[in-house]
């Protein structure tokens, strides 16, 4: 890993923004970090993102533990297992550039779906499917949040944040175990995650201070717009269209 000071600075800013977004609306670290990291250091995806997500999901689960939907979480967890296996298989057959393209495409699709106005009810079948999709996307691209956020988009924000956080925590453990078996967890990736975890937790601390007062009507669209631009950039880079 040979990152320039500019690249490290950009990753630090994105990690802080991701912690703030995730602590506020329930998604953020994966959807923001994945396309940027895929451009700067494709081989770090998804391991570094999953390592970053673990401490954040613990803190979020504890902060709003009273609002967790345990029934929905149980079905999500059941879906995570086959989804994680599918994600590992994808990693085994895709090249570095393909992972970059896939990461960007996943983000763009997730952003597109998130703009729909249909509000689903989190039934057992839907939460199971969301867990499976989250497991696959989280393991292969480090972006497991959007499927679950779409399932719960019509629920109380505290329920969304807490339930998704607990699901992410369980999912990251499964994904990390699978990636370790596949040889994807290395020392330099752990070091990069350690470098970025501080800024991410600063963002989370800011979200805790602002969460009761922050108006979300502008914040969520801003996150999705940033993700769309970064996702498109990742696709361009992975396809070799950027020069």
Image: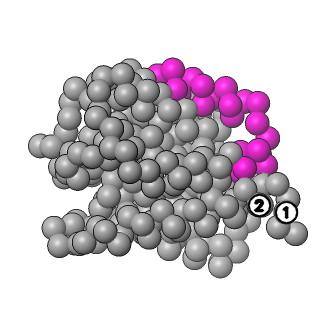
Taking the spot 37% from the left edge, 45% from the top edge, the residue there is 118
Instruction: Judge whether 11 appears above or below 97 on screen.
Output: below
Q: Which of the two residues, 157 or 217, is positioned nearer the viewer here?
A: 217
**Point 36% across, 22% down: residue:** 125
Residue receiving disc 2: 236
Q: Secondary structure at mark 2?
A: helix
Residue 22 shown in magenta: no
Q: Are marks 1 and 2 in contact (CB under 8 Å)?
A: yes
Viewer-nearest residue: 168 or 56: 168
Query: In the rendered image, which residue does mark 1 sit on?
Result: 241
Image location (x, y in percent) of residue 98: 76, 44
Which is nearer the eye, 187 or 136?
A: 136
Q: Secondary structure at mark 1?
A: loop
On the question of residue 37 being in view, the answer is: no
Q: Is residue 138 visible?
A: yes
- State left or right for residue 28 relative to residue 204: right
Direction from residue 15 to residue 109 in the image, left or right: right
């Amino acid at each position: 890993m040979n990152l320039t000071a500019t690249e490290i600075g950009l990753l630090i800013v994105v990690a802080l923004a991701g912690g703030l977004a995730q602590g506020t609306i329930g998604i953020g670290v994966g959807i923001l970090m994945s396309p940027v990291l895929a451009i700067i250091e494709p081989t770090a995806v998804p391991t570094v993102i999953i390592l970053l997500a673990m401490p954040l999901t613990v803190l979020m689960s504890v902060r709003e533990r009273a609002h967790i939907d345990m029934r929905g979480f149980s079905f999500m967890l059941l879906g995570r297992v086959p989804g994680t296996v599918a994600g590992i298989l994808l990693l085994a057959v895709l090249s570095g550039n393909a992972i970059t393209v896939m990461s960007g495409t996943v983000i763009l699709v997730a952003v597109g779906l998130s703009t729909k106005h249909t509000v689903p009810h989190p039934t057992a079948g839907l939460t199971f499917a969301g867990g499976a999709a989250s497991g696959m996307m989280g393991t292969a691209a480090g972006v497991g949040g959007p499927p679950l956020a779409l399932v719960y988009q019509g629920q109380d924000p505290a329920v969304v944040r807490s339930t998704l956080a607990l699901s992410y925590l369980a999912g990251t453990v499964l994904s990390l175990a699978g990636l370790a078996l596949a040889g994807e967890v290395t020392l330099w990736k752990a070091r990069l995650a350690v470098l970025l975890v501080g800024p991410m937790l600063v963002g989370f601390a800011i979200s805790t201070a602002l969460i009761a007062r922050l108006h979300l009507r502008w914040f969520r669209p801003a996150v999705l717009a940033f993700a769309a631009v970064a996702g498109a950039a990742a696709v361009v880079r992975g396809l070799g269209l950027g020069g």
